[in-house]
């Protein structure tokens, strides 16, 4: 389990961004009592959800 700071470092985002998304239930996370935590699978899922497939522009 990763803290928001650790997870944010792996995702290369600000901890505040990750905490806001978790509070809004916009990203997968776990609340252990009042403590916010992320599993490795949560982090992988967050990264996968942000994947964009490039599109080709044909003239």
Image: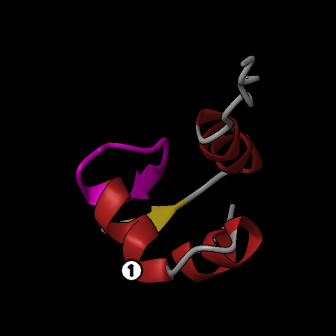
Position of 42 relative to 56 (above/below) = below
> Which residue of the protein is positioned furthest toward the front in this rendering?
59
- Give the colour scheme of this rendering: secondary structure
Left or right of 20 in this view: 44:
right
How packed mark 1 is, by other alpha carbons closer than 10 Å (few <14, some 14-19, many 20 or more), is few
Span colored in magenta? 23-32
Task: Residue 27: give x, y in percent of width and height.
Answer: 44, 44
Residue at 30%, 66% in the rendered image: 20
Chief SS of the magenta region? loop
Q: Is residue 33 visible?
A: no
Task: Residue 36: give x, y in percent of width and height.
Answer: 43, 65
Position of 14 relative to 47 (above/below) = below
Residue at 68%, 37% in the rendered image: 51
Q: Is residue 30 magenta?
A: yes
> Which residue of the protein is positioned furthest toward the top in this rendering?
58
Residue designated by label 1: 16
Task: Residue 50: give x, y in percent of width and height.
Answer: 60, 42
Left or right of 3 in this view: 24:
left
Q: Is residue 47 visible?
A: yes
Position of 39 relative to 17 (above/below) = above
Residue at 76%, 70% in the rendered image: 10
Locate the C terminus and report the quarter of the image it occupies.
Answer: top right
Along the line of sight, the residue nearer the viewer: 27 or 32: 27
Residue at 74%, 31% in the rendered image: 54
Task: Residue 16: give x, y in percent of width and height.
Answer: 38, 80
């Amino acid at each position: 389990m990763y803290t928001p700071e650790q997870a944010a470092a792996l995702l290369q985002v600000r901890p505040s961004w990750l905490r806001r998304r978790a509070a809004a239930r916009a990203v997968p996370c776990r609340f252990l009592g009042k403590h916010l935590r992320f599993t490795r699978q949560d982090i992988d899922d967050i990264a996968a959800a942000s994947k964009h497939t490039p599109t080709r522009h044909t003239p």
